[in-house]
Image (cartoon, helix red, strand yellow):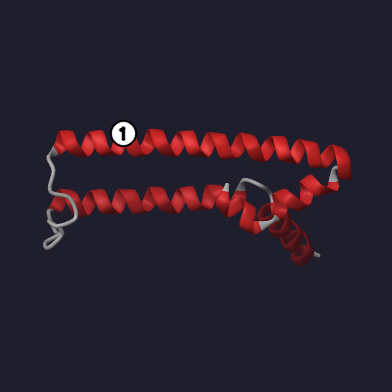
Amino acid sequence: MKHTKLAKFWDRLRSSYWFLPTLIAGVDFALALGLLEIDRRGKAPGWWWLYTGGTNGARSMLSTIASSMATVAGTAFSITIVALQLASSQFGPRLLRNFMQDIGNQIVL
């Protein structure tokens, strides 16, 4: 009995739309903290060739990359929502559930 409830909970959690994106964001956050700690300790010898600009150049580059990524993500998300809205009005609400439970879609979005 307990195993069935746990299996149902795990299936419902895994098939929810925000489970995988939240998990990916958590791993990314932990990776960022780890890389910051490596940078603070100065234990990254031999990485000088990755970026040779100063702090202002790095800030400018990261700002440009972040704004570009936000624009692309917003455009892709809004186009996806419009396409899903039109498809669900044609084919019914099961299409949305199947789309949201697909792991590939969760990873991409």
- Position of residue 17 relative to residue 77, above or below, is below
Q: Residues within 10 Å of mark 1 (few under 14, many from 20)?
A: few
Name the quadrant containing residue 57.
top left
Residue 31 horizontal side relative to residue 103, left or right: left
Kind of residue indicated by mark 1: Ser
- Where residue 78 sits: x, y (%)? 62, 34
Residue 49 horizontal side relative to residue 27, left or right: left
Please tell me which residue is depicted at 12% across the width and 63% down the height of the picture.
46
Q: Secondary structure at mark 1?
A: helix
Give the residue pinned by disc 1: 63
- Where residue 50 sits: x, y (%)? 19, 55
Please tell me which residue is depicted at 27% across the width and 53% down the height of the picture.
35
Quarter of the picture holding the N terminus = bottom right
Please tell me which residue is depicted at 12% across the width and 48% down the height of the picture.
52
Q: How many marks?
A: 1
Residue 61 horizontal side relative to residue 6, left or right: left
- Where residue 58 sits: x, y (%)? 21, 39
- Where residue 90 sits: x, y (%)? 87, 41
Please tell me which residue is depicted at 78% across the width and 48% down the height of the picture.
97
